[in-house]
Amino acid sequence: MWSRAAWETRTPRLRTPEIAQLLARALRPDLHCCGRNLGVGIVGYGPLGGMGYHHGLGVTRTDGLELVAVVDPNVERRKAAETDFPGVRAYASVSDLVNDDDVEVALVATPPAHHVTLTLALLRAGKHVACEKPLCLTVAEADQIIATATASRRMLTVHQNRRWDPDFVALRRAVDAGLLGEIFNVETFVGGYAHPCRTWHSDTAVSGGAGYDWGSHHVDWVLQLLGGVPKLVQAHGHKRVWHDVTNHDQIRVRMTWSDGREAEVSAEPTSPPCAGRSSTCRAPPERSWARTAPSRSRPSSRAADTWPRRRITPKRPPSWCSRGTRAATESARRDCRRRSSSRTRSIEISPTICTSASRSPSRRRRCAG
């Protein structure tokens, strides 16, 4: 039998990360053959229907995984977790989960400000970690987390669930198939005209701001579509209207690649149910260009099918929509344009709001067709 020194001397070519990874996968025991599942713990169960609940559903529906424990300091949420997933262990502190040997993989689903501390503690305890986006708020924190994962020989990943949105999947397939030609410009937008939500999402100290919250999804989309790393990144923000929250009223992030390709991400604060998002891809004119607008709510008017840039109809329409008349609609649009001009806010009113399709009283009340 060879000694460690002899093995390292005789097999220098095997001492590469790629070969080591392949060998580790080949020698890894097949858990399914033994009837054993990977134990999963969720840190931050959250409110009713929150990310913790959705992660729990994903775990229970995935072969080879078993939901073992959840962590939340709120007793009511722990009780909800026990009701939603009978048999799960509900802990008040992450230290209890760290000491649970049945938990091998931890999902961190807390607000971003807590990601670093929790992720480092879990990695150092020997847990594999999947952290909600954004992983952290500074480059130094990212370097520290990656270094800790490497030193602990544990897997670390960021949960980017929006990569699998059906509309984005369709768009990416079209781009990869060359249906849009060579993409040289991408623009994305998320936001609305409602008051920003009054939860931690609107607190820059907790969420990092819109650029880290919804913006991280949009930046990820851009990188998935264009590939590579931009040569230059610029950002600008406005604070003009919503002074009772700390997030900017609007941010704009521009990315430029060394070959001239470019992208822009725009974000405005809004309540999550009202958030609309749209995407634009441009290709050379001799081929084609296309606009798509993935929406969180179903388009509510036939007018949306013919509008060049389809926008969502918010679930909670503005107060002036309750009047439900064309005259009121046109007046409100003029008011919005005037306010938009005076505040230099980027507000776009979709023709799907209060269209002629609103015939019945109930439809007029909704003003969404």
Image (tube, rainbow, N blue to C red):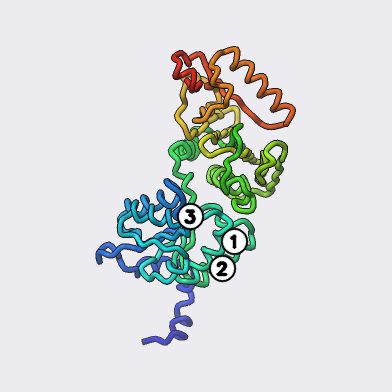
Which residue shows up at 58% across the image and 57% down it?
113
- For marks 2 and 1, the one nearer the N-term is 1
Asked whether disc 3 touches disc 1, contact meaning CB atoms under 8 Å apart, the reply is no
Q: Which residue is mark 3?
A: 109
From where the camera sits, is residue 186 visible? no
- Name the side, left or right, on which 182 lies relative to 109: right
Q: Which quarter shows the N terminus?
A: bottom left
Q: Residues within 10 Å of mark 2 (few under 14, many from 20)?
A: few
**Image x and y of residue 85, in percent:** 33, 54
Q: Identity of the amino acid at label 2? A: Ala
Asked whether disc 2 touches disc 1, contact meaning CB atoms under 8 Å apart, the reply is no
Secondary structure beneath dot 2 equals helix
Q: Identity of the amino acid at label 3? A: Ala
Secondary structure beneath dot 1 equals helix
Image height of 111 relative to 125, above or below: above
Q: Residue 311 appears in which quarter of the rendering?
A: top right
**Image x and y of residue 255, in percent:** 66, 44
Secondary structure beneath dot 3 equals loop
Q: Which residue is mark 1?
A: 142
99, 188: nearer the viewer = 99
1, 203: nearer the viewer = 203
Q: Nearer the viewer, mark 3 or mark 2?
A: 3
Give the residue at the far right of this rendering. Answer: 342
204, 147: nearer the viewer = 204
Q: Residues within 10 Å of mark 1 (few under 14, many from 20)?
A: some
Which residue shows up at 46% across the image and 32% down it?
297
- For marks 3 and 2, the one nearer the N-term is 3
Q: Which residue is mark 2?
A: 147
